[in-house]
Image: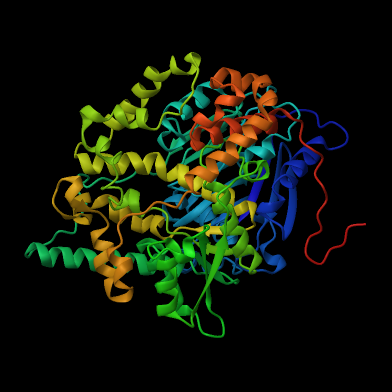
Amino acid sequence: MCGIAGLLRPPRPTPAGDPDRVLVTAMAAAMVHRGPHDQGIWQDGPLTLGHRRLAICDLSPGGHQPMTYRHLTITYNGELYNQAALRARLSPTVPLTSCDTQVVLAAWLQWGPAALEQMEGMFAFALWDVHQQRLTLARDRLGHKPLYLYSPAGGGIAFASEVDALLTLPDLPRRPHLPALHAQLLASPALAADPQATAVEAVTALPPGSLLSIGPDGRPARRTYWRPPTPHSGHDTGSGAGPPSTRRGRAAGGLGSHVIRATTAMLMGDVPAGVLLSGGLDSSVLTVIAARRASPAAPLHTFTLAYPGDAARPGSDLAHARAVAEQLAPRVALHQVPRTDTLALDDIDAVLDPAVLPDDPRHPAILATYQAAAGHGLRIVLNGQGTDELMSGYLTRPWFRHLLHPDAFAGLPASRQARALTPDVLADRGGVHARLLQLYQSMPATPLERAQHLLTATQIPHILRFEDRLAMRAGIEARFPYLDDRLVGWCLRHPQSIHIAGHSAPGGAQGKALLRRAFSPLLPAPVITRPKQVLPHPAARPLQQSLAALARDHHRDLAADPLIGHLFTLPNPSELDRLPASTLFQILGTWRWHLHLTRPPAPPRPRPLPGQAIN
């Protein structure tokens, strides 16, 4: 897992001093947290590639990037979970190390862009074909790994794993993208209708499941190589013959096999892996599977958030996580990650992402769990995200009902609208909601399938974006077994109704029924029967008080910020206590985000690689 960057220029006389190498070196240095173990810069004619390496598979110098094989050179960020199967299909004359980067190169050499259809995993890469003088940028199917783009005024393209890296370019305009900000505040980033838009005007994202190719003529050509399958596409739905209980039992067995396979595959690597264990069904299943490879001498490390009072609450995440860890002891070690119910400016600054406005006060706690994993020497952490979107896990949530009734859909973005917005922002509400409605109506017609596909297209990329950002800030590779390519395909091809137990009405039904059935023999009963829980928030009152105090202390700065004035109606200091914590977090986060965007980047501080000293 790594950070990648690059700059492709139109043909021109090369100025003295190799300026592109300097620029790409600075871009890579801005992502040192994504790759603390190695760095590399490579140039050929109009192209400069940069790389920062987090060593996971093949810890030797053989994994150094950018990597060249014959006439192909790549800078690659990702993991191929089916690399062993691909190796077996590649030409036996291809010399392969244990690094999956070389597998990607060999696969591209053998199959060209069709190699993307063979690759199972998470990835974003830039590949240069010196014979064709062609640069190809590609991103995985669901958007596990990010790739951001900027087109300089003089032509060409710059790209990087993080917007922060692009912001080191001196000619990039550091302006907010107001339409994207309006859309986020009017409907939340989890319902983004435009997968290319970012919060920075000059920066776009390469959409998931797509590639961008730039040949000698300099014209970019983008195409989509993967779209979510539907139950109506002619694939086997898995219902088969026999009574409903028999069909459901077969489906549960099929789902369980996919989950075990995906989880086992994502334990691959030359470093140990841990699990974020919330005590819910999803993470508990991952824990029981991963624990099979652990031992008392080398236990599986798991991490659970603990807010004040959680230790004494029988129904807390911590209590359920303890039950799972105790059942699997001594092969599982549970680590509590203590958190307070208050936030400081440093907490907000730590989770800023230039690609999107900060909007979730739980993100500092998520970052803390990844930091705790890094503190125990881990580089890989399994994360249970994805089941709710793919297996009707949100069925009992009130907002999910908007997705099941087309006439009520307009209530969904309205329910996620930020508070205290200005008339300038609210004037865009009709357009934002119309674009979401158009996207919603383009999904499969069955209400459950439509809901599932909308969440797959919007919420899953949003979750993967912030999880990748927070994990990589801590130097951790987050892996998502439930978002394995083949498992996602299985879920999308099967009718969503097979995941629902109970009455058909949302209030009397429960999602993730197959997952519960498949793993009920392996987990404590309270975990199997536990109702759907969201990741805990800090306690509302202490959080609101701490954020209101911050807003009062910095009210003059907030009032002077033109972006705050454009987006929010800022109350007087004496009235800040009336705003909910979520709104205060958005206002404070937007102010800090704008400062981060408009301040010139500080010169990167040199950091030694392992075993290297800096004089």
Quarter of the view holding residue 26: top right
Q: Residue at x 30, y 48 (%)?
A: 394
Of all residues, the one furthest to the right in this rendering is 615
Quadrant in which residue 289 is drawn? bottom left
Q: Is residue 248 above or below residue 509?
A: below
Say how the picture is coloured.
rainbow
Residue 5 in the figure: left or right of residue 90: right
The residue positioned 45% from the left and 68% from the top of the image is 265
Quadrant of the image for the C terminus? Answer: bottom right
Q: In the displayed structure, would residue 353 be above or below residue 441?
A: below
Quarter of the image with the N terminus is: bottom right
Q: Identify the residue shown where x is 68% and y is 44%.
A: 346
Give x and y (percent) for residue 562. 64, 19
Q: Position of residue 435 (x, y in %)?
A: 36, 24
Q: Nearer the viewer, residue 150 or 286?
A: 286
For the residue pair 489 and 113, the one nearer the viewer reads as 489
Where residue 436 appears, as percent x and y from the top left, is 35, 28
Query: Which x, y percent locates residue 152?
Result: 67, 26
Between residue 219 and residue 562, name the one nearer to us: 562
The answer to whether residue 122 shows anywhere in this view is: yes
Who's the residue at 43% across and 26% down the image? 186
Which residue ends up furthest to the front in the rendered image?
574
Residue 157 in sight: no
How many labels, in total? 0
